[in-house]
Image (cartoon, rainbow, N blue to C red):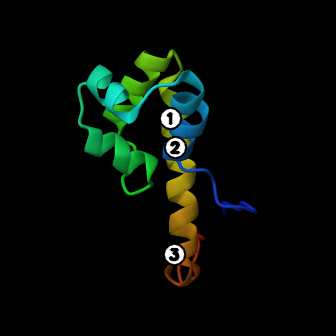
Amino acid sequence: MYHLKRKPTHPGEILKNEFLIPLGISQTQLANALGTTFRTINEIINEKRNLSSEMAVKLAKYFGTSVELWLNLQNKYDVYRIMNTKRRQLNKIKPYTG
């Protein structure tokens, strides 16, 4: 199974602390550059919205990163959350033995 000692960082936190703040880009500027709304960017940064595949592509193009960077951040965050919130249900599932 998937074991992590700490909760993975949400991609919104990475976006804010590793890109927007150091580069001096506002949420509004980013939203305009990506052709999206301030609300979308704000909700991602505040961890109220997951990062979609489309947004990962847009962020990768804008910041010159890989799409996988953004998708992997979101995927790790999602898997950790599921493993912790659905633990009882997951423990009831027995592996297929053939």
In this rendered view, identify the residue nearer to me: 30 or 97: 30
Kind of residue sitting beneath label 1: Trp
Q: Which residue is under mark 2?
A: 11
Residue 96 visible, this angle: no
Q: Work out how far the residue at label 3 is from the one at label 1, CA to CA, in angstroms.
A: 23 Å
Above or below residue 63? Residue 14 is below
- Any mark on residue 85, and which? 3
Which element carries disc 2, helix, strand or loop?
Answer: helix
Q: Residue at x 52, y 38 (%)?
A: 16
Residue 81 visible, this angle: yes
Q: Residue at x 31, y 20 (%)?
A: 33
Q: Are marks 2 and 1 in contact (CB under 8 Å)?
A: yes
Above or below residue 63? Residue 27 is below
User: How many C-alpha atoms fall within 10 Å of the one at disc 2: few (<14), some, or many (≥20)?
Assistant: many
Q: Work out how far the residue at label 2 is from the one at label 1, CA to CA, in angstroms.
A: 7 Å
Between discs 2 and 1, the one toward the N terminus: 2
Between discs 3 and 1, the one toward the N terminus: 1
Q: Which residue is under mark 1?
A: 70
Taking 9 as reference, is 62 left or right?
Answer: left
Between discs 2 and 3, the one toward the N terminus: 2
